Image (cartoon, grey):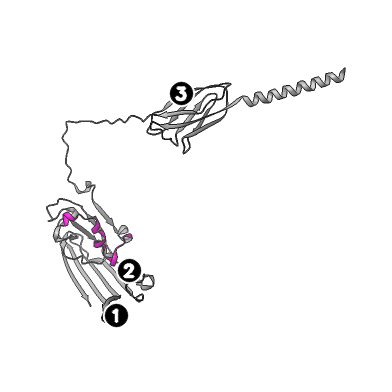
Amino acid sequence: MSYRIIRKSGLTAFLLATMAVVIGAQATQTLTGVVFDQNEAALPKAQITLQGARTQNVKSDEHGAFRFDKLTAGDYTLSVVREGFKTVTLPVTLGGRTLTPLRIVLPVADVEQDVTVSDAAAQLNSDTANNQNVVSLDRATLNKLPAFDQDPIAAVSGFLDAGATGTGGVTLIVDGVEVKKLGVTSSAIQEVKINNNPYSAEYARQGRGRVEVITKPAVAQLHGEFNWTFRDARFNARDPFAATRAPEQRRMYEGNLVGPLIRDKKHPTNFLFSGEHDEQDVQAVIFAKTPTGTLRQNVPTPSRQNEFDFRVTRQMTDKTTLSVLYSYEDRN
């Protein structure tokens, strides 16, 4: 008799444990869905918030899908938020049956724009400091500029307007004076401006056809700079018309020296000396058809160039400056 009671008790405990496992497994559910726009395109990175006994947040994946796991039965509120779209909120009830994946469509948000109309007359500000279309290159920018042959004017010519330059070419202004050539080495330039004062009556061309160069200012003590540029044919590609790669080489030396000449607080006199020496050992390629056959030959065309510029500037008044410039150039 006692044996049967023990067997029935064990069977009852087993059934109760099995029912507890089944009930526990059915106590949680999974909520899934996909977020679309009005054109049936999936919306990734949408913020989905599920509020119930506790609040959970997920984001839709690249396919617009989202998923909440281990949810207990009850009433929830689902909110979907994404920039540029209206927020969608809907109730969700979890019970005994399995939910099908939700399909949520977000409508495009309304665009609002406020326009304020005033009877006050608009004031035209002609101050050059308020010019938003000026191109200004300081010394740090000029050092990083890929200027071929150390020519900053050619490098900045891309900012000019062909319609403004016309057939006369670019108008070059150095320290407020219109010149035909730069007259200083590239290292002596402090700043380059284009379109600084677009419609100034002081100049014949408008801003997009004019390059204004400001050289390094004088300082209380002597200040100088020296640069050396070296190029070798080892880094060159062979000319397709040449039989061999030409053994070319180029060496460029340039620098400047600036400082006070006469120390006078009311009428200071300063000087700027700049110089450049360029050595080019290059070769020209000859590719021609002759009666005896094809001629392919490298011909040396060396060149030497020296340029020295010396300028003295005296401040006559607050608005008047006297400048004297001497330039020497030798090419062979």
Q: Secondary structure at mark 2?
A: strand
The boundaries of the magenta stretch are 144-165
Q: How many marks?
A: 3
Is 289 or 44 nearer to us in this picture? 289
Residue bearing mark 2:
227
Residue bearing mark 1:
293
Measure the alpha-carbon separation of dots 1 and 2: 46 Å
Residue type indicated by callout 1: Gly
Whichever of callouts 1 and 2 sits on the residue coming sooner in the sequence is 2
Measure the alpha-carbon separation of dots 2 and 3: 71 Å
**Seen in the image, is 163 located left or right of residue 24?**
left
Per the picture, the main secondary structure of the magenta-coloured stretch is: helix
Residue 163, position as x, y percentages in the image: 16, 54
**Seen in the image, is 104 located left or right of residue 142?**
right
Q: Are marks 1 and 2 in contact (CB under 8 Å)?
A: no
Residue 187, position as x, y percentages in the image: 28, 65
